[in-house]
Image: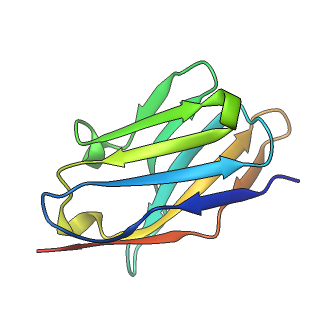
């Protein structure tokens, strides 16, 4: 079992920045962030492997940066130039490809006001 503890999030004005953190109870190869806007499906924001390979959703490319500290089993999401459409519940995800195990954090609300 894997526990994910998220922190960060909150209310920010458009154009502002926020940083999310997610600490895992153990080392996981692929970690990332998904988000679910009100009334919409959950979507990939960004993911990163233990080797540092990253993937971003099209809507956040050039604005968000994902990083991780393997020694702390922690992944970060730096969100810059935030837009109202970034408003969503953001979920930390840990994925173990072997066996296709997915683990989720409890979610943290990000609200961007115009």
- Viewer-closest of 94 and 15: 15
Instruction: Report which quarter residue 68 is drawn in.
Output: top right
- Viewer-closest of 87 and 78: 78
- Viewer-closest of 82 and 96: 82
Point 69% across, 38% down: residue:
73
Instruction: Report which quarter residue 10 is drawn in.
Output: bottom left
Residue 112 left/right relative to 105: left
Q: Farthest residue toward the top?
A: 51
Residue 58's place in the image compared with 82, above or below, is above
Residue 44's place in the image compared with 54, above or below, is below
Point 64% across, 70% down: residue:
106
Point 53% across, 61% down: residue:
7
Residue 53 left/right relative to 38: right
* Image x and y of residue 99, in percent: 86, 39
Instruction: Report which quarter residue 64 is drawn in.
Output: top left
* Image x and y of residue 37, in percent: 38, 72
The image quadrant where one finds the C terminus is bottom left
* Image x and y of residue 13, in percent: 16, 69
Point 83% across, 32% down: residue:
98
Residue 57 left/right relative to 36: left
């Amino acid at each position: 079992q894997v526990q994910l503890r998220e922190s960060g999030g909150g209310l920010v004005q458009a154009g502002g920045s926020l940083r999310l953190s997610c600490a895992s109870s153990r080392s996981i190869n692929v970690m990332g962030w998904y988000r679910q806007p009100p009334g919409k499906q959950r979507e990939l924001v960004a993911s990163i492997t233990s080797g540092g390979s990253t993937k971003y959703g099209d809507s956040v490319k050039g604005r968000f940066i994902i990083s991780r500290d393997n020694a702390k089993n922690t992944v970060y999401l730096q969100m810059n130039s935030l837009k109202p459409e970034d408003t969503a519940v953001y979920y930390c995800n840990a994925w173990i490809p072997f066996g296709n195990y997915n683990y989720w954090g409890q979610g943290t609300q990000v609200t961007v006001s115009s």
